[in-house]
Amino acid sequence: MIEVRPYDTLGHANHGWLDARHHFSFANYYDPSRMNWGSLRVWNDDTIAPGTGFSTHPHENMEIITYVREGAITHQDSLGNKGRTVAGDVQVMSAGTGIRHSEHNLEDVTTRIFQIWIMPNQAGHAPSWGARAFPKDDRAGKFFTLASGFQNDGDALPIHADARVLGATLRKDQIADYHLGTERLAYLVVAKGSVEIEGRKISEGDGAALSEIDILKVRALTDAEVVLVETAG
């Protein structure tokens, strides 16, 4: 099953410095049919103006993954971590028993990110933060695991969840296969370009809720970049 969620149907909040689209219910946007997809709870498409950002605020018991699409984001938290994550790279914050953090665009250009929240496999993990560079060659023409709750996923950033976050960059007409399994769920968002899944076109910014698919086949209609979250059903 494929449910395409076009970009212009997503929740929308424009705060001036932040222009956000919400794939799932978040803040003042509420849609009872879009509360979560498996353990995936939040997927925000955020555009952050230069010299602005999210001031220090708390989280707990949530796995928060930031995929930087353009520009860069600078993180600082109550554990003493500080880091700058640039376009194409990923950071993960496990909020666990509690953490306070800020996220700022300290660049001279606009920053665009996907902010993804995944519910943990249990409450009470120790909080942590980490970031990694993922060269685009690693995910050229195929899905590459960026963050994972499974130990056999190589250098992927660890999360405390029955889930994976994957990325792929495709040339026009390339096809990327992914063994999802009919018991698993996935949510895919196109970061750049457009793709086709089982005859359905998914354009930049659109989301697709996927279920009951054993082998997922994504064909690029243009040069494209996609991000996928796989979770338990």
Image (tube, grey):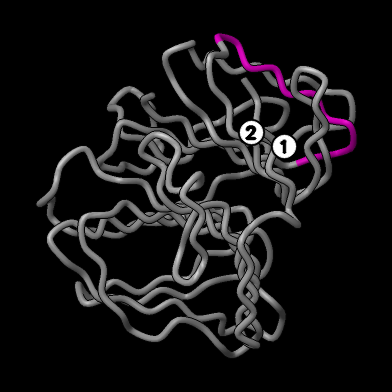
Tell me residue 184's x, y (percent).
43, 20
Question: Which quarter of the figure is the N terminus placed in?
Answer: top right
Tell me residue 222's x, y (percent).
89, 37
Side of 221 where 204 appears, left or right: left
- Whether the residues at callouts 2 and 1 have beta carbons within 8 Å, the answer is yes
Tell me residue 143's x, y (percent).
60, 28
Residues rendered magenta in the picture: 214-224
Tell me residue 102's x, y (percent).
38, 79
Give the crowd class for mark 1: few <14, some 14-19, many >=20 residues within 10 Å: many
Q: Secondary structure at mark 1?
A: strand
Looking at marks 2 and 1 on the same chain, the residue that comes earlier in the sequence is marked by: 2
Residue 118 in magenta? no
Residue sitting at x 56%, y 84%: 106
Q: Residue tagged by mark 1?
A: 169
Tell me the amino acid under the disc marked 2: Arg
Residue sitting at x 31%, y 34%: 149
Above or below 13: residue 138: above
Q: How many marks?
A: 2
Side of 164 where 170 appears, left or right: right
Tell me the amino acid under the disc marked 1: Thr
Q: Secondary structure at mark 2?
A: helix
Residue 219 in magenta? yes
CA gap, disc 2 and disc 1: 6 Å
Residue 153 quadrant: top left
Residue 19 quadrant: bottom right
Above or below 36: residue 7: below
Q: Residue tagged by mark 2?
A: 139
